[in-house]
């Protein structure tokens, strides 16, 4: 794996853990696709730093368990502000 990829993967992992950000939020912050963020965190991170991977997995599982709540809040805000 190339050096710049390892640095990007570690930076994405640290950001995700520190801010408890979703894959979408991380992708927007770094200006890359959600697919790249997901591939980096799920597939490439274990070979770079397995301990960091376990911490990232906890954040991603938390986000997954809360996604139905976020979706409901987004819909409520959309109707509240008359966007629909």
Image (tube, rainbow, N blue to C red):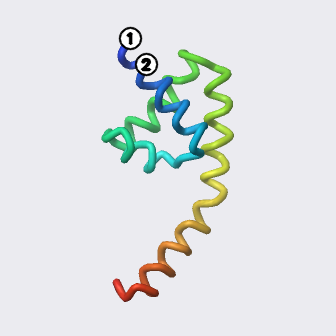
Residue 56's spot in the image, x, y percent? 61, 35
Residue 10's spot in the image, x, y percent? 50, 23
Q: List the residue tagged with mark 2.
A: 7
Q: CA distance from mark 1 to mark 2?
A: 6 Å
Is disc 1 placed on a helix, strand or loop?
helix
Above or below, 4 against 25 in this view is: above
**How many C-alpha atoms fall within 10 Å of the one at disc 1: few (<14), some, or many (≥20)?**
few
**Snapshot quadrant of residue 70:** bottom right
Is 83 displayed left or right of 53 in the figure? Answer: left
Q: Quadrant of the C terminus?
A: bottom left
Q: List the residue tagged with mark 1.
A: 3
Q: Are marks 1 and 2 in contact (CB under 8 Å)?
A: yes
Is 62 displayed left or right of 24 in the figure? Answer: right
Front residue of 21 and 65: 21
Q: Residue at the front extreme?
A: 18
**How many C-alpha atoms fall within 10 Å of the one at disc 2: few (<14), some, or many (≥20)?**
few
Which residue is found at the position 44% from the left and 33% from the top? Answer: 39
Above or below, 34 against 7 in this view is: below
Above or below, 6 against 76 in this view is: above
Residue 60's spot in the image, x, y percent? 60, 44
Residue 1's spot in the image, x, y percent? 40, 11
């Amino acid at each position: 794996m190339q050096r710049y990829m390892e640095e990007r993967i570690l930076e994405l992992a640290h950001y995700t853990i520190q801010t408890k950000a979703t894959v979408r939020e991380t992708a927007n912050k770094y200006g890359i696709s959600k697919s790249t963020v997901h591939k980096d965190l799920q597939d490439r991170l274990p070979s770079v730093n397995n301990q960091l991977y376990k911490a990232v997995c906890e954040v991603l599982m938390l986000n997954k368990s809360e996604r139905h709540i976020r979706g409901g809040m987004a819909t409520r805000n959309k109707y509240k502000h008359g966007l629909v």
